[in-house]
Image (cartoon, rainbow, N blue to C red):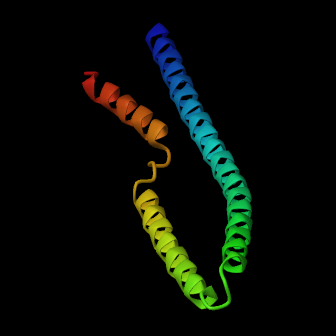
Amino acid sequence: MSESGGLLESLKRLAGTLLAIIQTRLELLSNEVEEERLRIWQMLLYGSIALFFFGLSVVLLTAFVVVLFGAEQRLLVLGFFTALYFLAGLLAWTGLRRIHRERSRLFSASLAELESDRERLDEQP
């Protein structure tokens, strides 16, 4: 009877250990989701503020340069700024697409921990 009691205790400890591992992995996953959410909100906030002030400065600079030139060259200056802003927009779009393709893999730490857990289980007889 002591063998079955020992076996039962062993199974209980094994189940407790497995539950603890699962709980730890879920907590890690939850932390990663929260960190990613906060990072995205910070990027949106700072990006919006930067875009607003850069846009304002570009409009004011354009108005300043157009007024600085005489009436004969104003259309030429406006055409130049239009082409310049279009090229800047294309460069920004290209950069955005590059960043999007190089984004980090979500849950990479959790997946790595689960992989190491699986390898440890495979090593045991």
Instruction: Name the residue rendered at 66%, 44% in the picture.
Output: 34
Q: Nearer the viewer, residue 1 or 41?
A: 41
- Residue 44 horizontal side relative to residue 104, left or right: right
Outermost residue to the top: 2
> Residue 22, how many percent across, how many down?
54, 34
Q: Residue at x 33, y 25 (%)?
A: 120
Tell me: residue 100, above or below residue 78: above
The spot of residue 39 in percent (x, y) is 64, 46
Q: Examine the rendered structure and indicate whether residue 74 appears above or below residue 87.
A: below
Asked if residue 63 lies left or right of residue 83, the reply is right
Q: Please name whichever residue, 36 or 125, is drawn nearer the observer in this view of the structure.
A: 36
As rendered, which of 43 and 14 lies closer to the eye? Answer: 43
Q: Quadrant of the C terminus?
A: top left
Q: Residue at x 40, y 35 (%)?
A: 112
Question: At x 69% / y 57%, what residue is drawn?
Answer: 50
- Between 22 and 72, the residue placed more toward the observer is 72
Position of residue 42 relative to residue 32, above or below, is below
Q: Position of residue 25 (x, y in %)?
A: 54, 34
